[in-house]
Image (cartoon, rainbow, N blue to C red):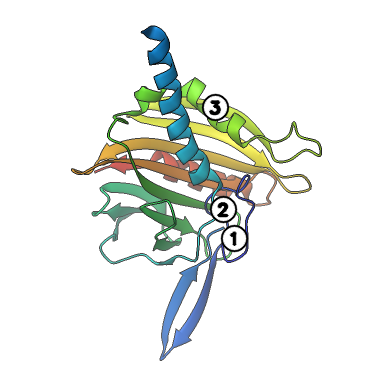
Amino acid sequence: MAAAVNSATAPLCRGLSSSSSSGGARTRRATVRCGAGDARVEGLRRREALLSVLLSTTAASAPALAPAAAAAAPAELQEGFRTYEDEANKYSIAIPQDWLVGAGDVSGFKSVTAFYPDQVAESNVSVAITGIGPDFTSLKSFGDVDAFAESLVNGLDRSWKRPPGVAAKLIDSRASNGLYYIEYTLQNPGERRRHIVSAIGMAFNGWYNRLYTVTGQYIDDAADVDKFRAQIEKSVKSFRFT
């Protein structure tokens, strides 16, 4: 995110890390490159409000992220994964054992935490959290997952423009465990196609409702695509509220 990213086309986390040493200690910073008629109108407004948050979560660029705080500590090593537990934000997620973790505040978001391999900029997972209004009580307030996913991906697609912009294509959508799961691809003209898998959920922290957007991405034609696809899909699907 140190470099500018097209805010209409790029997922939240896209880059990786740099390191420096001082007195023998190594410090990492992540550059992680989200009547009946009245009721219907109100429903559309509510859906559009949430979609606007999701589009910004999916598309925004974020600043450099510092190493995650000790309060959000990893645990439970198994099968090459560890469970990252964020006690403050009440969620857990499984990440590859050797991946790095960065966290920070981003304009418009309560917090962003990114998980990424040391040398591969295009593959990563992020969890973005933002506060939303008290009338947003659950994802069901915004319609079923299929319509929701189509609206989200259509909001990102610019392939119809002349000259064409980013091409977004919906692959799958489903609801499970109180979350919406959406899978789609994004491809800027002249660039490789990025595969996105997301889990979207809502929770109440005692003061206000919050939207959680878990976004994983990898490059479809990368040499190591099978490895990162499996890791990222498992990580996104593992997200749970605690």
For marks 2 and 3, give the one nearer the viewer.
3
Q: Residue at x 44, y 18 (%)?
A: 41
Q: Give neighbour class at mark 1: few <14, some 14-19, many 20+ (Cα, 10 Å).
A: some
Which residue is nearer to you in this view: 145 or 9? 9
Q: Does the residue at mark 3 contact the one at mark 1 (Cβ under 8 Å)? A: no
> Horizontally, is 93 left or right of 204 in the view?
right
- Spatial separation of the CA atoms under disc 2 and disc 1: 6 Å
Badge 3 marks a residue whose secondary structure is helix
Residue linked to disc 1 = 120
Q: Quadrant of residue 200?
A: top left
Closer to the N terminus: mark 2 or mark 3?
Answer: 2
Q: Is residue 69 above or below residue 189?
A: below
When asked about the image quadrant of residue 181, the answer is: top left
Identity of the residue drawn at 40% across and 14% down: 38
The correct choice, above or below, for 55 with respect to 41 in the image is: below
Residue that mark 2 sits on: 123
Residue designated by label 3? 151
Q: Residue at x 45, y 65 (%)?
A: 65
Where residue 174 appears, x then y in whole percent?
Answer: 45, 25
